[in-house]
Image (cartoon, coloured by chain):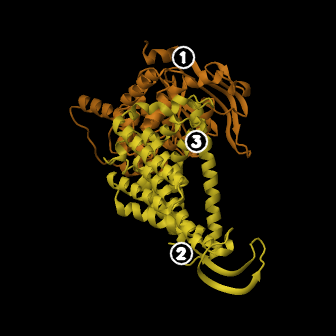
Amino acid sequence: MKKASNLWKEKTALLELKGVCYSYPDGTEALNNIDLTIYRGEKVAVIGPNGAGKTTLLKILDGLVLPTKGVAKIFGMPLNKKILNSKKMYNVRKRLGFVFQDPDVELFSATVWDDIAFGPLHLNLSHKEIDKRVEETLKLLNIENLKDKHPYNLSGGEKRKAAIAAVLSVDPEVLLLDEPTADLDPRSKAEVIDIINELNKTGKTIVTATQDMDIVPELADRVYVLNKELMAEGTPKEIFSDIEMLKRNNLEVPEVMKLFEVLKCFGYDYTRLPLSINEAIKVLTETIETEGGHIHLHIHEHTHEEIKKLKGKYNHHS
Amino acid sequence: MSFTERTLYEIINWVRDSVFSEIYADKKGFLQSLNPRIKFIAFLCLLVSVVCVRSLQVILFFLLFSLLLVYFSKIPFKFYLTRVLIFIPIFTGIVAFPSIFNIFQQNKGRPLIVLYNFGYTVNFPFLKPFSTIEITEEGVYWALTFVLRVTVSVSLTVLLILTTKWPSLLSSLSSIRTPETFIFILHMTYRYIFLLATLVSNMLFSRKSRIVGKETAIKSWKLNANIIGALFLKSHDMSENIYLAMLSRGFNGQVSRSMINVKERQMKEGNIKSYLFLIATVIFCATILLKEALM
C-alpha cells in the first residue's frame, strides 16, 4: 500500500461540492454557495462558530441530505433525489463514515457490541466475519472491556470511542467527524486525537468539523473556515495568521500560538510560530540546541506596550 | 417539590437503579443462572396459569411461589415487597373497588353488609333496578381475586425483568417468533426512554432552580406546557438524527433477524438447570390447572 502522503499528492478528489446552498424547511439559510473538495488521504478541518452550518455540510458530504442548490459529487457521482433513494446509495454510504456530534444518536443498540455489529450486519457478511470485524474494531480503539455494556452506563469519553468504533466497523474510506472532542476530558480528548491520526496514517481520509481551535493543527493539513459561506481555505498556519478574518467569524488562534507571541514580547526570537504543543516542543528544542542551552527572557522597554497590543489583537481584556 | 415532580423523580430513580444498572441481573442467584430463553418460556407458562386460575387459594399459592423465587434469586425482600406488594394492590384495588357493591354487579349476590335500604325499587340509567346498596360476598371475593391476580402477574413480570438483562430478554422474544420489527422497536424504546426521562428531570430541575417565590397554578401549567413542547421538538430532532446515523451505517429499512440475535452465543449457558426449572414449572402449572378444571 502506498503511504498516505503519496496518495494525497496524487490528489484524487473524493468529495466535491460546487455552488452548494442549503436552507432549512423554514427558509433559514444554513449554507450559501460552497465550493469545496476533499482529496484522498488528507486531513481536513472545517472550522466555524456555532450555527455556521458545519453539521449540515457534513450531512451533505455523507449523502444524507441533498443541497437545495448546487452540485454535490460523492466519489465522482453527482447526487440527486433519485440516486439518494436508490440502492446505489448503500454502496456509496459504505465508503463513508459519519460520526455524529451526540454519541447518544450513534449508539442506538442495547450494547456496544450490537452497535458495532450494526453496520457490518447490513453488508451481508457472515456471522463469523461480523464477529471478527467487531473484535478487531474493539481492539483498535482499545475498548474491549466495554463490549457488553449498555450505552447508558458509559462515560462521555467511552461513549465517543464507542461511537467512532460503531462507524469504523463498516471500514469506510472517508471519516466525517462532527465535533469529535466536544465534552471530553483532557485525557479522552488526547486519546481521540491519537486515534484519528492513526486512522489517517492507515490511509483513511479525515474530515473534522470543530470549533476547538487547539486541536485543529493536530487534526488537519488543510482548513476551511465556514460561516454559512466559505470564508477562507488554507493550511492551519495560513488560517491562523489571518487574525482579522478569524475575529470576524468569532474564532481565534490556538492558545499555544498566543503564548509564543507573549514570549516574543519578552524577547524570545523564535524561527517559526508553533501552533500545537508538539510543534512548540520542536521549536523550543531547536532554539535551545542552537543558542547554547538556554532561552533568555527579559523585560525590555517595549514589552508592556507590545503585550497591550497583543491583548487588543486577541480581544483579551485585562 | 410538588407531587408530580416528586413522583417523576422517584420513578426515574427507581428505573435507573433497578433496570438500567442491572444490579439484580448481575447477582449470582437462581433465576439469574438460568438460560434466558427457557426462563422466559417458563414465566410465560406461569403467567398464563395465573390468569386462568379462578380460586383465591391457588393464586395465593402462586404468590408464595414467586416469593420463593425472589428469595433464591437474592433480590432484597424489602425492596421487592414495597415496590410490588404495596403499590400494585392499591392501584388495582381502586379499579376493583366499585365491583364489591351490588349495584354494579350483573347477578344477585349474598349481602355481606347492607349500607342503605331504600324500601322501594330505584331505576337508574345504565344500572339494573335496585332497592338496597350493599356489599356482597361474591363481590368482595371477585375483587380480592382480581387484585391478587394482577399483583401476582406483575410480581412475576417484574421478577423476570429484574433477573434478566434486556438484550437477552429481547433475544428470548425473538426465539418465540415475535416479529423482528417489533423487537427492534422495543430495543430502541429501552435505549431512549431513559434518556428522555433524564432530560425531563433535568428540565424540571433547571426550571426549579430559576423559580423565585410562589408560583400560581396557572403559571405552573403554562411552564409545564412549554417543557412538553420543548421536549417534543428535541426528541423529534434527535429521532431524525438517529435515523440518519442508521442510514449512514448502511441501514436499508430492513430489520434482519440476525440483528437481534447477534449475542446468541451468550445464551447457551446453564442448560440442564434451566430445562429442569421449565419442566418443574410446566408440571406445577398443569397440575393446578387440571385440578381446577376437575373441581
Real-space CA distance between mark 1 and mark 3, rounded to the nearest whole angstrom: 44 Å
* A14 left or right, relative to A41: right
Q: Which residue is mark 3?
A: B185
> Front-most of B133 and B259?
B133
- The answer to whether B102 is drawn above or below residue A310 in the figure is below
Q: Colour of chain A?
A: orange
Q: Position of residue A117 (x, y in %)?
A: 47, 30
- Asked if marks 1 and 3 fall on the same chain, the answer is no
Q: Position of residue B263 (x, y in %)?
A: 44, 33
Mark 2 neighbour density, 10 Å: few (under 14) some (14–19) many (20 or more): few
Q: Which residue is mark 2?
A: B212
Q: Residue at x 54, y 54 (%)?
A: B51
| Secondary structure of the residue carrying numbered label 3 | helix
* B269 left or right, relative to B140: left
Q: Which chain is yellow?
A: B
* A32 left or right, relative to A42: right
> Front-most of A122 and B170?
B170
> Chain ID for label 1?
A
| Secondary structure of the residue carrying numbered label 1 | loop
Q: Residue at x 64, y 69 (%)?
A: B221
- The answer to whether B121 is drawn above or below residue A19 in the figure is below
Is residue B162 at least partly visible in the picture?
yes
**Tag 3: amino acid:** Ile
Numbered disc in front, either 3 or 2: 3
> Front-most of A93 and B8?
B8
Q: Residue at x 62, y 46 (%)?
A: B237
Mark 2 and mark 1 in contact (Cβ < 8 Å)? no
Q: Residue at x 50, y 40 (%)?
A: B170
Q: Which residue is mark 1?
A: A11
Real-space CA distance between mark 1 and mark 2, rounded to the nearest whole angstrom: 61 Å
> Chain ID for label 2?
B
**Tag 1: amino acid:** Lys
